[in-house]
Amino acid sequence: MKKILITGLEEKIKKLKKERQAVILVHNYQLPEVQDIADYLGDSLELSRTAAKTEAKVVVFCGVHFMAETASILCPDKLVIVPDVNAGCPMANMITADDLRSLKEKHPGAAVVAYVNTSAEVKAESDICCTSTNAVKVVNSLKDKYKEIIFIPDKYLGDYVSKRTGKKLIIWNGYCPTHVKITAKDIISKKMFHPQAKVVVHPECTPEVIALADEVSSTSMMCKFVKESKAKEFIIATESGIIYRLKKENPDKEFYPASEASVCPNMKRTNQEKILWSLEELKEEVRVPDDIRQKALKPIQAMLGIV
Ligand code: 13P
Ligand code: SF4
């Protein structure tokens, strides 16, 4: 009975998507029922790139608010909609444009690297964006040109990038509430039960967790690592939604979440019913005011140009 209902919804979404000339972009942390109807499933960088080149008239963004905002900045001629307008990113809310302006006043001449997990207003005050895929490359591209580099808002990603590039950074005190729930103790105890398992860690985790990793990468790069690895077991230290994709793509491998607590409630707000509603009503639109959009576009394009 349940499957018939889900299939009915899927059929309706498929039909309406065609009529609206819409594309459904889905982040790797989304619920299985959302991943199953994705036109594109990926990490922040892949989804921004896909949004930038899509021919569709409507973009249904299933992720969190800053991701849809980035898509809207990249394609102002398209209608970007989100199935749940309350799906935000608490880390992105940890720095405001005023906060960043004050920090810049204290460090005149510093370059500002903004993780994409920031609002459009904050991006508008930044020099270049980065995602977890390319943060090291972005900082490497600047480190000899700038005496000082400000890195916002994630202190753990900032610390990881600083260690990898050898560049001391001025780092904002933000963090992801979901990734900090994963502790080194969690990894050590999972390793006791699965000694052969490779430890795969997102760079939003704490330095103590990163120190125990065999691989540190963005969500889609984790999928690539797992696919190419000869190992059969993996301890996954990131938001648990990715395990559905990993299992689907690697049915012969085993995955253990480092912590059952690492669930991002915002990433779980979207479901098939809400997607259907958003396609029916063409809501909720995410649009960035043009003056902010023009300024925020530059650091996003600078990032897309570098990598
Ligand atoms: P990725 O770019 O690795 O998918 O990360 C996005 C995110 O929000 C991680 O918490
Ligand atoms: Fe934001 Fe963390 Fe959720 Fe990613 S997992 S969207 S960084 S709160």
Image: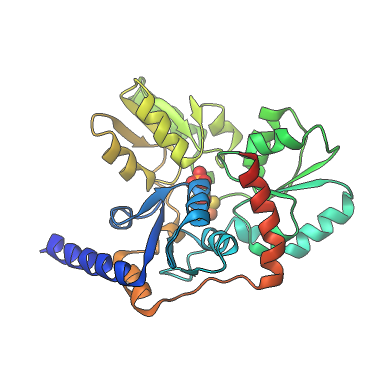
The residue furthest left is 1
| Name of the residue lying farthest toward the front | 55
The percent position of residue 195, horizontal first and vertical second, equals: 36, 20
Does residue 291 appear in the picture of this structure? yes
Q: Nearer the viewer, residue 275 or 141?
A: 141
Coloring basis for residues: rainbow
Left or right: 62 as drawn, with respect to 293:
left
- Image position of 284 with respect to 151: above or below: below
| Residue at 33% from the left image edge and 64% from the top image edge | 271
Q: Residue at x 53, y 60 (%)?
A: 71
Total numbered badges shown on the rendered structure: 0
Which part of the image, by quadrant, shows the C terminus? top right
Q: Nearer the viewer, residue 28 or 196?
A: 28
Q: Is residue 298 above or below residue 13?
A: above
Q: Quadrant of residue 92?
A: bottom right
Q: Residue at x 12, y 63 (%)?
A: 4
**Between 53 and 7, the one nearer to me in the picture:** 53
Q: Is residue 155 left or right of residue 58?
A: right
Residue at the outermost bottom position: 281
Task: Where is residue 163? Give x, y as percent.
Answer: 68, 29
- Image coords of residue 251 (percent x, y): 24, 34
In this picture, residue 208 sits left or right of residue 35: right
Instruction: Name which residue lies at 23% across and 29% down.
Output: 252
Query: Whole-percent x and y of residue 158?
Result: 67, 40
Q: Quadrant of residue 198?
A: top left
Residue 28 appears in the rendering: no
Q: Quadrant location of the N terminus? A: bottom left
